[in-house]
Image: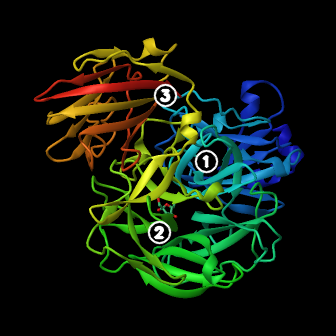
Amino acid sequence: MISLKKQGIAGTMKTACMCTLIGLASMANAAEPSVSVRHLASEQNILLVKDAKRYLLLPVQDNAPEGKLYIVVNNQYEGSVINVRLAREKVDYYVPLDLSAYVGQDISIDVQGMPESAVCWKKISLSDTFDTTNREKFRPVYHHTPAYGWMNDPNGMFYKDGVWHLYFQHNPYGSTWGNMTWGHSTTTDLVNWKFEGDAILPDAWGSIFSGSSVVDHDNTAGFGEGAVVAFYTSAKPSPWGDVQMQSMAYSTDNGKTFTKYTGNPVVTSAKRDFRDPKVFWYAPGKHWVMILAGGQEMDIYSSKNLKDWKYESSFGAKQGAHGGVWECPDLVELPVEGTKEKKWVLICNINPGGPFGGNAAQYFVGTFDGKKFVNESPTQTKWMDWGKDHYATVTFSNAPDGRCVALGWMSNWQYQGVLPTLQFRGSNTIARDLSLYRKDGELLLRCAPSPEMEKARKEQVLVPPFKVSDTYEIPSLFEGNEGAYEIVMTIKNSGASRIAFTLSNSKGEKVDMYYDVPREQFVMDRSESGKVDFSADFPAVTVAPVSATDNISLRLFIDRSSIEAFGDGGKFVMTNQVFPSEPYNKMSFVSGRGSYTVKSITVYKL
Ligand code: FRU
C-alpha cells in the first residue's frame, strides 16, 4: 500500500471498488513492492512498475490464450501492443520485456485479457539480467537457434567485413508465433552463432514479416556508402482485411541497429499475400530488383535508388506446384558446372503443397533480363530438398568469392507450434552452397554443405573395416556423445537392390535410411525416431530421387534434433527433424539381396 500512495493512485482505487492490489515482491519478502497489480473489471489489469529495472520477467504458459500488454508512460501508450501467453495455471518459461528505456522510472503496463486468478501475477518480477542458458536437450549444437522464443524464416541475410548476418522471424515474447520482429544473430564461420538482440521491431504499419538486406556499396539510396538496407513486409491485421506492404530500414553500423525509412511503406498493392521482398543488384542494367510473393505469383519490381520501385512483371501462372501460398522468393544467377554458362534460379517456397505434406522449396531454372524471368523447363517441378523440414530458404547478399550461400528454416508449419521444446522453438539448416549441374539435359540445383562445415569438424574417427551386418557404437568414437556429429560414407554397390543403414539408440528408437536401387531413390523413415506423437503429421517417410547407385557417397549431419542427408555432394538433400529420447549411438547396415561394400565410413564430432 505504501507504494500506491507514493505513486498517487490511492484515490483512483477508492472509486474502482472492484480492484484488488497485490504487492508482488512484498509477498516474497517484506521489502517495498516494485511490481504491483490492480485488477479492474473483465480481465483488465494494470501493472505498476516502480523503479524499473532493465527487464520485466514475464511468466509464460505455452498453450494459454494470449493476453495483450501495452507500456504506458505519462498516460500515453509507448510502442506497439505485445501479445503474451501469460501463465494462467503454470509457468513453462519466462520471457524478458525490455524496460531499459525506463530504468529507474515508474511506469504502468496495461494488461488486457488476463483473469485475476492467473498465476502470473505472483511470478512477474524485475531483473537486471535475463538468463538464456540452454537447458533443453533438443537444442541443436551446431545449427542456429534463437537464444529464446519462437523462430521461423531466415531474413535479411548478408555478409560484410568477415561477418555473416542472419535476421530471423522472432517472437521475443514466447515460443509460439506472434509479435513478428527481426531477431539478429552473427557468425564468422557459419557454425557458431551469437545472438545480437532484436534489430527491427513492429511499428504503426504492423509487425515485421520476412524480407532481405543489401549492402549499398555505391550509396544509391543516400543513406551512406556501404549502408545496409533492409526490406521487410509490414503486416497489418485489420477488421477490414489484413494489409501487407513493403517497408525499408537502413543501418550505418553494419546491421546492428536500423533506422526506419520515413517514407514507408515503399511498395504497396491491393493483392493478398503480398510479401517477403528479396532485393538484389542487377549489374547489366545498373539497377536494383525486388522479387516478392504476390498471391500465386512472384512479382518483380525495379529501382535505381531503393526507394522508388516500378512494377515490371509477374512469374508463376501455370508453372510448378500451386498446392499452397507462394512465399519467400529468391532469384540468383548460378554457374553451370563444367561450362562457362550461367543461369538464373528462381526459388519459390510454398506452404502447403510440398511433396510430403506442409511446406517445401521449389525452384525454376531459366533466364532473367533484369525485368522478367523465363522458366526454361515449364513442365517439371523441381524441389530443393526432399525432407519435411526445409523451408523459407533464401540466400545471403554480398557473399564472398562469388559464392551463393543458402540457409533454410528447419521445420514445417504443420507442427512447428507443437515441437517438443519450450524455451526456444525453431532452428535453421546448415548453410549450403548452391550451383547448377546438368542431368539428362535438365539443369538441377546442387545444394552442397558449405565448406565451413569441414572446418567445424572437431574429432575424426575412421571406422575400421566395416562389414555389412556389423553394428558400431558411436560413443566409443569420441568422448561422450552429445548427438552432434557427421557421418561420411562411400559405398560400392555390386548388385544389391537395397542398401540400408540405420541409426539407433538403446531405447529402440531408430531412423532407417536406404537406397532403393531399382527405383533410384534414397528413403528416410523417421516414424520410430523417438518422440513423434506430438503431431499426426510428424511420423513420415521421405523419398529423394538419386542419380548414382553404383558408387554411393553420402554425408549425414546429425544434430540433437535433426538429420540432413547430402547425397553425391548435394545432388540430393533431405532434411528431417527427429526427437530421440537419447542420442543415436549405434549405426548398422543391413545385408540384403545382392551385395555391396562399405568402402569407408568416417565419423566427425561437430
Ligand atoms: C513464411 C511466412 C512468410 C511471412 C512469415 C511470417 O514462413 O509465412 O511468408 O513473411 O512467414 O512470419
Would you name the residue on which mark 1 appears?
173
- x, y (%) of residue 58? 65, 41
The residue furthest left is 593
Q: Is mark 2 within 8 Å of ligand 1?
A: no
Amino acid carrying mark 2 in the image: Glu
- Is the residue under label 1 in contact with that under label 3 (CB below 8 Å)? no
First in sequence: mark 2 vs mark 3:
2
Residue drawn where x is 85% and y is 38% of the image: 2
Residue 356 located left or right of residue 451: left
Residue drawn where x is 28% and y is 38% of the image: 551
Determine whether 230 is above or below 456 in the image: below
Residue 179 located left or right of residue 249: left
Q: Mark 3 Cα within 10 Å, few/some/many (few <14, many 20+)?
A: many
Determine whether 595 is above or below 337 in the image: above
Q: Mark 1 Cα within 10 Å, few/some/many (few <14, many 20+)?
A: many
Would you name the residue on which mark 2 appears?
341
Residue 70 located left or right of residue 107: left
Q: Quadrant of residue 255?
A: bottom right
The residue furthest front is 339
Q: Mark 2 Cα within 10 Å, few/some/many (few <14, many 20+)?
A: few
Q: Nearer the viewer, mark 2 or mark 3?
A: 2
- x, y (%) of residue 418? 41, 43
Would you name the residue on which mark 3 appears?
484
Amino acid carrying mark 1 in the image: Tyr
